[in-house]
């Protein structure tokens, strides 16, 4: 992009930048699924996604400094060259040291590789396979969940695409110059980082993502209302507050990533569902900036109104998705009973090792008391233990979440 000198050149460079960036986030989601249990995935996804906020904070400072360098080069050329070189250097590090899967990790011995795989058993999501399954693709297309994820990420990506593009112009319309606008994006990045990691931390603690996503919609709704109703003159502090409230929205996207990832099994189905998810994100990012017209500055009424409506739509979609996941859990429970299995499965992938061990003891004790009474206590406890040991026997069989009756959907 540093070589571009006109609109056509910048457009072509941006096109290829998008082409090469398209695989980054889906690959990171896939890597997270390969290495971590479902309980761990939410925070891990938030950590790498939160780097967007980190970049907005420190990248703004670096950009401010680079923009003041006296050079024959234009400011944008210096900025693109600086960050471009960093990206190229780090890509070499990723290529050399990032293994394709735990089994192929050179820094693990054979015993460690077995541990890395075995700890994922209760995810019930299979393991990485290079086999393409057309039936998985078909199921992904026909699965209602896929379209819920698509709708959710599409709905949040429209505000995201608009604010990320026009956010600096909104701040500039408050009366700041270009370089001051860069500095005022530092708090935006800080709020983004806190909402991303904080929201995922809460979701991990309560073992639910839907309520957290709905809760994270509240500050952006308030921020949109403030920017729409506050006077454009003499209210810089209040309007900046509204803008920073909107900046909570980035915490929603990684939760949708992890929500989808935690509720999809089967290697090919995971890949296809992830692809549909990011298609929805890309389409939303294309539409978002089109809702903000320079002629509507400084109010940007159409853009803010549409964003406000979409945050409300997300809350409705979260409720619908949660209800559907509850229906799927009940359906799987009925299937297990029909097969002579326990109706309730203890999903240890959602808990820490200490929590899971305690829950297993409590479950075994409760089952023993119900089934055996005093005389058959030991026999029932042993039976319950054996039943729990059988759970996950087909976890690595590359079954989809709908095929595997032992798969537990998370809200």
Image (tube, rainbow, N blue to C red):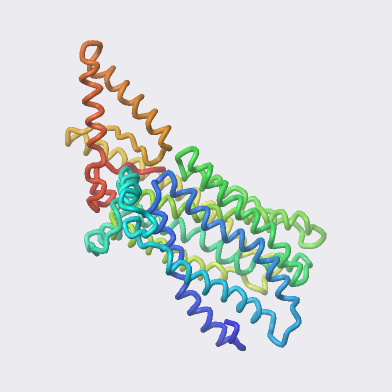
Q: Is residue 98 left or right of residue 227?
A: left
Of the 4 image quadrants, the one containing the N terminus is: bottom right
Q: Identify the residue shown where x is 38% and y is 62%.
A: 99
Q: What residue occupies the far front of the structure in this picture?
A: 109
In the image as oriented, which residue stretches furthest toward the right? 234
Residue 265 location, x and y as percent?
31, 52
**For the view shown, which residue lies furthest in the left direction?**
339
Residue 206 falls left or right of residue 51 = left
Does 408 appear above or below 301? above
Q: 9 or 170: which is nearer to us?
A: 9
State the image coordinates of residue 362 (x, y, percent, origin top left). 36, 24
Quadrant position of the C terminus in the picture = top left
Q: 161 above or below 246?
A: below
Residues 228 and 22: in front is 22
Residue 220 image position (x, y, % from top left): 61, 53
Q: Residue at x 34, y 53 (%)?
A: 109
- Residue 115 versus residue 309 in the image, above or below: above
Asked if residue 118 lies left or right of residue 58, the reply is left
Q: Is residue 42 left or right of residue 269?
A: right
In front: 362, or 371? Answer: 362
Residue at x 25% of width, y 59% of height: 136
Total label count?
A: 0
At a point 49% along the width and 65% down the height, the residue shown is 284
Q: Residue 128 in the image: state x and y as whole percent.
A: 30, 58
Q: Quadrant of residue 175?
A: bottom right
């Amino acid at each position: 992009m540093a070589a571009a000198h006109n609109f056509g050149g910048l457009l072509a460079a941006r096109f290829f930048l998008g082409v090469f960036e398209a695989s980054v986030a889906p690959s990171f989601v896939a890597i997270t699924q390969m290495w971590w249990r479902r309980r761990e995935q939410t925070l891990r996804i938030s950590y790498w996604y939160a780097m967007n906020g980190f970049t907005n904070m420190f990248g703004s400072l670096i950009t401010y400094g680079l923009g003041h360098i006296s050079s024959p080069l234009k400011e944008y050329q210096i900025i693109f060259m600086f960050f471009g070189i960093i990206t190229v250097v780090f890509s070499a590090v990723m290529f050399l040291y990032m293994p394709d899967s735990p089994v192929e990790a050179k820094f693990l011995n054979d015993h460690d590789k077995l541990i890395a795989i075995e700890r994922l058993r209760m995810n019930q999501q299979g393991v990485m396979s290079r086999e393409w399954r057309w039936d998985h693709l078909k199921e992904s297309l026909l699965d209602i969940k896929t379209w819920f994820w698509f709708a959710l990420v599409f709905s949040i990506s429209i505000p995201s695409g608009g604010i990320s593009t026009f956010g600096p112009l909104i701040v500039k319309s408050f009366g700041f110059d270009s370089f001051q606008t860069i500095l005022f994006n530092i708090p935006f990045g800080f709020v983004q980082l806190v909402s991303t990691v904080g929201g995922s931390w809460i979701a991990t603690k309560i073992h639910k993502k839907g309520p957290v996503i709905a809760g994270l919609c509240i500050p952006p709704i308030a921020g949109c209302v403030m920017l729409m109703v506050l006077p454009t003159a003499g209210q810089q502090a209040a309007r900046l507050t509204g803008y920073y409230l909107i900046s909570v929205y980035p915490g929603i996207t990684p939760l949708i990533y992890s929500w989808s990832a935690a509720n999809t099994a089967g290697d090919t189905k995971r890949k296809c569902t992830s692809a549909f998810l990011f298609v929805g994100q890309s389409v939303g990012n294309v539409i978002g900036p089109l809702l903000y017209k320079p002629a509507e500055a400084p109010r940007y009424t159409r853009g803010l109104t549409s964003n406000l409506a979409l945050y409300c739509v997300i809350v409705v979609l979260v409720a619908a998705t949660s209800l559907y996941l509850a229906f799927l859990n009940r359906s799987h429970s009925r299937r297990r009973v029909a097969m002579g299995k326990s109706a309730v499965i203890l999903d240890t992938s959602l808990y820490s090792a200490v929590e899971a061990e305690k829950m297993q003891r409590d479950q075994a004790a409760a089952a023993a008391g119900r089934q055996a009474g005093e005389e058959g206590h030991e026999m029932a406890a042993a039976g319950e233990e054996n039943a729990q040991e059988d759970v996950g026997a087909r976890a690595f069989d590359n079954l989809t979440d709908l095929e595997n009756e032992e798969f537990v959907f998370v809200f």
